[in-house]
Amino acid sequence: MVTIQDVAKAAGVSPMTVSHVINDHPHVRSETRERVLRAIAELDYRVNVAARNLRTGRTGTIGLAVPEVDRPYYGQLGAAIIAAAARHNLKVAIEQTGASREGELAALALSRNRLYDGLILATVGLGPADTDLLKVDYPMVILGERIFDGPVDHVAMPNVEGARAATAHLIERGCRRIALIAGAPRDEVEVSGLRHDGYRQALDEAGIPFDPRLLAAIEGLTMEEGAAAARRLNESGAEIDGAFCVTDTVAIGALRGFADAGVRVPQDVKVIGFDNIAEDAYTIPSLSSVDPDHPLMAAQAVGFLVKRLAEKGKKRQVAREFISHFSIVARESTGG
Amino acid sequence: MVTIQDVAKAAGVSPMTVSHVINDHPHVRSETRERVLRAIAELDYRVNVAARNLRTGRTGTIGLAVPEVDRPYYGQLGAAIIAAAARHNLKVAIEQTGASREGELAALALSRNRLYDGLILATVGLGPADTDLLKVDYPMVILGERIFDGPVDHVAMPNVEGARAATAHLIERGCRRIALIAGAPRDEVEVSGLRHDGYRQALDEAGIPFDPRLLAAIEGLTMEEGAAAARRLNESGAEIDGAFCVTDTVAIGALRGFADAGVRVPQDVKVIGFDNIAEDAYTIPSLSSVDPDHPLMAAQAVGFLVKRLAEKGKKRQVAREFISHFSIVARESTGG
DNA sequence: ATGAAAGCGCTAACAC
DNA sequence: GTGTTAGCGCTTTCAT
C-alpha cells in the first residue's frame, strides 16, 4: 500500500506538503505541486479514507435511514438526497429501518458510532414519546411525514393542507361519498392521522357529513393493501364515488383493486393519491396526486445537515423547520 | 468523547480487555465482561468506527453502484442487496453512476480509496474494452445485465434465454408480428443486444421471419421512452400483435403508450417485459414478465464478495460466475 | 512556502 | 484470561 510518506519521499518533500497538495491548500509553490502530483500519479497513490476520518473526526458520509428503498417513494427520495448531498461533496449511505421503531433507533446508534457525519431520518416508527431519543449531539434532520416539535431539525410536507386540497379536488369534481384509504391513525403526528385530518377538514368545509363507513383502514402502506381496501370498499355497499389514498403506492394498488371489482375509474369512482411519484403519469388511468416537491425537500434536508456540520463548535441552536409547499396534479383518475 | 481507555479505567481493566469484550472474543471471564459492560453503559461509550477501520484495514461497508436508485428495478435490487449484506454484518453505501461510463469509473475509484471493503457494480456503461479497468485489487462483483468474461467475478441474468422464452411465450399466445422495444445494441454484452438475440432466436425457432420494421429503438430504458415507442409502433402501420419490452419499466411505459393510441392490451397487442418488478402485478392490465430471481442474484453477489473478503491474503483466484435461472410469469398483458 | 512533532482511538501480536 | 507495546496513515499545530 502506497502512503503519503512514499509519495513525499518520491517527490523529495515532506508528508505535510503532500497533504497540502491533496487537500488543495493554497500555500504550495506550483512547481512543488506539480512534482507531488507527478509522484502521486506514478505511484498510483490513493488517500486512505479511514486514516483521514480518524484524524479529522469526519467521514464525509451522511446516513439516510428510510423504511424501505424498494418503495418507489423512498427510492425517488433517496435519489434526490444523493444528488443534493453530492453538491456538498458528501456521500450517502442508505439504511433500511423496515418501517419499525427498532430499525430507526438502530440508525440513530450508527451515527452515534461516528460512522456518519450526520443523519437524515425518515421516521415512521418513532413517535412523540420518543422525542428524548432524538436529542442527539450530532447533526440530524427528520424528514418527511411526521412532524415533531422537539428540539430537532425537521423537513416536513404539508400533510394536512395537501390532504385537504386532494379531498377538495375530488369534491370539486363532483364526488360526495369519498373514501379514505389510510392506516389507522396511531398518534397525532403520523402521516395517516394528519392526512385524515385534512380529509375531514375538506368535508367540513364543503358541508359533507363524515361517514365512518367510508374509512378503509390498512396495515401497511403497500399496493397490496391498497388493492384489498378498494375491493373491500366495493363489497361493503358504501357506494363511494371518490377515494383519497394516503400515498400513491396505496392508490396504485387501489386502481388495481377497483379494476378487479369492475369499478371504472374515473367514471364510477375518482381516485387521488399523495406524493406524485414518477409512476403516476403512466398508470392506466394516470393518477392524480398531491406533489409536495420532494427535490426541494431533499435539498432542504441536506442543507440543514450541512449547516449543522458547519456549526460544529457552537452551542445547540434552535431547531430549524421547513414545511414544503404542494400542488395538486390532476390526471385521468380524477377526470383529467 | 469517551474512549476505550476511559472505559478501561472505569472498569479497572486494560483497554485490551475492553476491546475483547466489544468484539465478543471468547477468552474473557464473565465476571470481567459484566464489569466492562457496566462501565460501557454508564459512560455511554461508543466505538469509534474510524479508528477501528484504520487499525483493521476494513470498513464493514460495501459499495453498491447502480445507475439510478429511483428506477424501481434498482431500488428493488438495492433492497435485496442491503438485506443480503446485513446477514453478513455488512453495511451498504449506494452510489449512483447515472448510467454512464464515467460514473462507473468514479465508483471504482472510491473503493480504491478504501472507503469500501468491496464493490458491487451494476454496469451498463463499461464495455468489453474496459475489462482492464476492472482488474482491481479489491473484492468486486459485476452484477446484472452485462456479461464480461474478464478476470472479475460476476453475477448475471440469463438474458438471451429469458428473452427467447418471453418471445416464445408471445408466439404461444398466438402472436406473429412481435415488436421489440429496446435500446440500440451497442456491443455484444449489453442488455438490449443480448435480449435482441433471444428475441431473434425465438422467431427463428418458430419459423417467423424477422422484420426490422418491428424494432423500436429507444435511447434510455425509461417509461417515457417506452410510451413513445408504443405510439410510434402504432402509427408506423407495422400492424403488430405483440411486443417484447427490454425491461418492465419500458413495458409499463408501453402499456401507457398503447392505451394512448387506443390499442387494447392484450386483445390487440400482447405485451411482456423483463425483470418482474413488484409493480407488474398492479398495472392495468397486469404485466407478464421474465423473472430472473433477483433476490437470489443479490445473495450470490454478496456471497461472492464475502468470499473474496475472506480470501484476503491469497493470490488472485479464478473469477467466479453465476448465471441466474428464470421463469416466465404470465399475467393479463399476454392474456393471463 | 514548507516541515517536525504529536497523536486521533483502536486492535494485532505477543507476553505473562 | 488479561495486559503491554506498538503503530495503522493521516492532519493539526506551530515553527521556520
Image (cartoon, coloured by chain):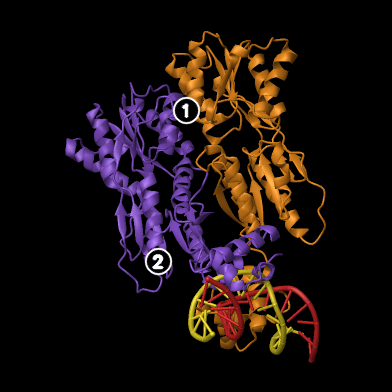
Chain colours: A purple, B orange, C red, D yellow
Task: Name the spot of residue A230 as percent of width and height, x first.
Answer: 41, 32
Label ID, residue B224: 1
Chain letter of mark 2 equals A
Decide which of A52, A152 is in the foreground and name it.
A52
Q: Which residue is mark 2?
A: A310
In the image, is residue B92 above or below residue B74?
below
Number of labelled discs?
2
Callout 2: helix, strand or loop? helix
Residue A105 shown left or right of residue B33 in the figure: left
> For the residue labelled by badge 1, is the local secondary structure a helix, a strand or a loop?
helix
Name the amino acid type tagged 1: Glu
Mark 2–mark 1 Cα distance, whole angstroms, equals 41 Å
For residue A322, what is the image quadrant?
bottom left
Subunit ID for the residue under disc 1: B
- Choose between B273 and B27: the one closer to the eye: B273
Q: Position of residue A91 (x, y in %)?
A: 51, 55
Residue A80 in view here: yes
Give the residue displayed 65% in from the left and 39% down from the top.
Answer: B126
Is residue B62 placed above or below B266 in the rendered structure? below
Q: Residue at x 56, y 50 (%)?
A: B94
Q: Is residue B89 visible?
A: no
Residues packed near mark 1 inside 10 Å, few (<14), some (14 to 19) or many (20 plus)? some
Where residue B305 appears, as percent x and y from the top left, is: 71, 52
